[in-house]
Amino acid sequence: MGFSQDFVWGVATASYQIEGAAFEDGKGLSVWDMASRKKGFVYQGHNGDVACDHYHRYKEDVALMKGLGVDAYRLSLSWPRILPEGTGRIEERGLDFYDRVIDELLAANITPWVTLFHWDFPLDLYHKGGWMSPDSPKWFADYTAVVVDRLSDRVNHWFTQNEPQCYIGLGLWDGVHAPGDKLRFDEVLLAAHHSMIAHGLSVQTIRARSKSKAIIGAAPVGSVTMPASLQPEDINAARADMFAVNVHTPWINAWWMDPILKGEYPADGLEFFGDMAPKFTDEDLKTMNQPLDFFGVNTYSAKTVKAGADGKPEFVAGLPGEPLTNMDWQVKPECLYWGARFFHERYGLPIIVTENGMAGLDWVSKDGQVHDPQRIDYLHRHIEQLRNAADEGVPVQGYFQWSMLDNFEWAEGYRKRFGLVHVDYQTQKRTPKDSYTWYKEVIATNGANL
C-alpha cells in the first residue's frame, strides 16, 4: 500500500529558533529573549538574537524548500513580533513579515501550516503571571484573532500550540527552558489547565474568523511506549503504560490529550494527583474539547516495556552501547509505528507526524559537502515504520521532518544540529546535507524508494 497519494511531506521550524531579528521592527521581548541572558542558562551563553537570520533570508530558505520538493512547511509565528506587549497594540511590521513569508511559500507551491505558539511567550505577559494567570486563555485567543484576521485568506492549516509538555514542564517545573521557573506541582498543573483552555478558545476563534475552511490540530509531545515483543501481553502493557497517570511529571500523554480530545481529565490522573489537580468546571472541559481535524504528534524516540508477572508494565532498560542521537535519545524507529497506532486507537483521529528527526555531529567536510549518513539511516528507519502503520490501516496523513535548517536548539544553543541544511552561524551560509538530497527522493517517489 504505502502512503496515500495525498500524503503530505513537509519540514518544520520555529520562530525563535531561526528568525533572529530579535529587536527589529518593533518586536517585543519573549521569555526566551530574557532567559537566554541568564548566566549559564543556555550552552556557552548562546541566544536567538540572530539565529539563522531567517527574518532577512527567508527567500533563500523558501527556495531551498522548493528545491527539496516539500508539499508543506510548518512554521511558527512569534507572538511578541505581532503583539509586542502580548495584547493590545498590533505591530504591523511583524504581520508584514509573515505576509511576505506566506506569499513566498505560496509562490513556490508550498502550503503553509502555521503554529500559533512555539514557546516564545511575550515577556510582558509573563510579568503579568504567564500561564499561571487565569487571563492567559483570553490573551491567547485575542492573539489568535489578530493572526487569523490577517492570514486566513491564504492560510487554512493551523496548529494552536507546540509541545505544552515542554513549555510548561521544562519551563515551569524543571526550570531548564524559558522562563526558567521551578513551581510547585499543583501550580504546574494549573498552568497546564490554562494552556488547554487557551487551546480550546484558539480553535473556536480560528473556526469563527477564518476566511477559508480551517484545518486545525495541535502538536503535543507524543511520548511513546513500545512493547518489548509482539506478544499480546507486552502490547497491552505498552498501551497501558503510554496512557497511565501514575507519576508526578508533566510528561504524561493522557493528562494533556484526554481533555482536548475526549473532554475529560483521565480518572487515574485525578485520583493520583488528588488535591494537586486544578479545580475545573464542565464549561472548562467543553472549551478545551473542540473538534480537531487531525492528531499532530512530535515523536523522536520511545521507551520499552514488557508485561511483568502481574501483567503490569515493566520498564526494559537499554543495552550498553545502543545507538543514541546527539541529544542522547535512544534510536527507536518503532516509535512512529506504535505512536501512530496507539494514538489513533485512543483518539480516533488521522495521524500527522509533526516533528521527527535527529541531532547529529555535522560539519562541512573538506570537499565542501556535509555528509550525514546517520541522519539518512535514522529517517529511513523511522519513515519506514510510519509506512508500516499506514499499511496496517492507520490513517497517516503526513510527515514533517525536524528540521529544515540547523538552528538554535533552546538550552543547548547551537551545538545540536537537526537540519537537512547546514548553517554556518558566522557567515549564514547554507549547505544542503546529503540527507536533503535523500529526503528529496523520498518526497518525489512518495516514499516508494524506501
Image (cartoon, rainbow, N blue to C red):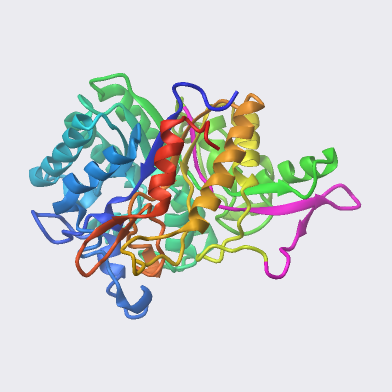
Q: Is residue 19 above or below residue 157?
A: below
Residue 10 locus on image (x, y percent): 39, 38
Residue 302 within the magenta-colored segment of the rendering: yes
| Residue located at (9% from left, 54% from top) | 26
Residue 401 within the magenta-colored segment of the rendering: no
Q: Nearer the viewer, residue 338 or 137?
A: 338
User: In the image, is 40 to the left or to the right of 305?
Assistant: left
Q: Nearer the viewer, residue 1 or 79?
A: 1
User: In the image, is 90 to the left or to the right of 297?
Assistant: left
| Residue located at (30% from left, 54% from top) | 121
The answer to which quarter of the image holds residue 391 is: top right
Give the magenta part as a residue range: 294-321
Residue 96 locus on image (x, y percent): 11, 41
Residue 138 locus on image (x, y percent): 30, 40
Q: Hey, which residue is sitting farthest right in the picture?
A: 309
Q: Quadrant of the N terminus?
A: top right
Q: Nearer the viewer, residue 242 or 441?
A: 441
Q: Is residue 240 above or below residue 273?
A: above
| Residue located at (84% from left, 41% from top) | 231
Q: Quadrant of the C terminus?
A: top right
Q: Is residue 198 visible?
A: no
Q: How many marks?
A: 0
Q: Is residue 72 visible?
A: yes
